[in-house]
Image (cartoon, rainbow, N blue to C red):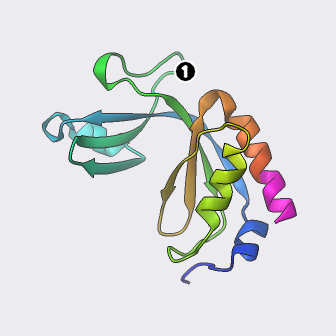
Amino acid sequence: MSGLTDLAALLSGLSPRLDPLTYEFVCRAPDRVTSRDLERAFATLREAEGMTLVLPLTSPDGGLEGPDAGLTMRRICLEVHSSLEAVGLTATVAKVLADQGIAANMLAGFHHDHVFVPADRADEALSLLQRLSRTG
């Protein structure tokens, strides 16, 4: 199955689900990334400046400290099976959130898109995406 490309079908089947975990985006020099980091990471991305890791917080009262500390985020999985060739889904989701002043950091997986939003706005973001799914 290759996933949906029709924007109306994608939006009506969006099925956003809020992950109960909280995450941090951190950047480390490649030589500072451990095998434990890689095992724990939800996602990684290599850039010229270093490796970005999306790591779940291990305790509810905080995550990393010091130069690696990042913004705490929550993940909303868009459960619809979207094609990597779909056009407009990322833009539509980002605009709905941007209109309410909510940052949206999108990651596309092979089957689903994932939206990372500031932890303190996650419930609001989920509600907006649920409404988008109902109205298409």
| Residue 122 in the image: above or below residue 110 | above
Q: Callout 1: 10 Å neighbours few (<14), some, many (20+)? A: few
User: Left of 127 or right of it: where is 29?
Assistant: left
| Residue 58 pos. (x, y %) | 45, 26
| Front residue (pair 84, 20) | 84
| Residue 68 at x, y percent in the picture | 31, 25
Horizontal relation, residue 66 to residue 119: left or right: left
Left or right: where does residue 122 sit relative to residue 124? left
Residue drawn 78% across the image and 47% down it: 128
Say above or below: 38 vs 2. Answer: above
Left or right, 32 with respect to 25, comes to: left
Relative image position of residue 43 (x, y in whole percent): 39, 49
The image position of residue 50, as x and y in percent, is: 22, 41
Q: Main secondary structure of the magenta part?
A: helix
- The stretch of residues the image draws in magenta is 130-136
Amino acid type at image mark 1: Pro
Pick the quarter of the image with the N terminus. Answer: bottom right
Image quadrant occupied by the C terminus: bottom right
In the picture as drawn, the residue positioned furthest to the front comes out as 99
The residue at 48%/18% (across/down) is 62
Q: Is residue 103 magenta?
A: no
Note whether 35 is above or below 65 in the view shown. Answer: below
SS category of the residue bearing label 1: loop
At 58% from the left and 45% from the top, the residue drawn is: 104
Q: Quadrant of residue 32?
A: top left
Asked which quadrant contains residue 65, the reply is top left
| Residue at the bottom extreme, as displayed | 1
Q: Nearer the viewer, residue 63 or 119?
A: 119
Q: Residue furthest left?
A: 31
Residue drawn at x 74%, y 76% is: 9
Identify the residue position indicated by label 1 in the image: 60
Q: Nearer the viewer, residue 94 or 15?
A: 94
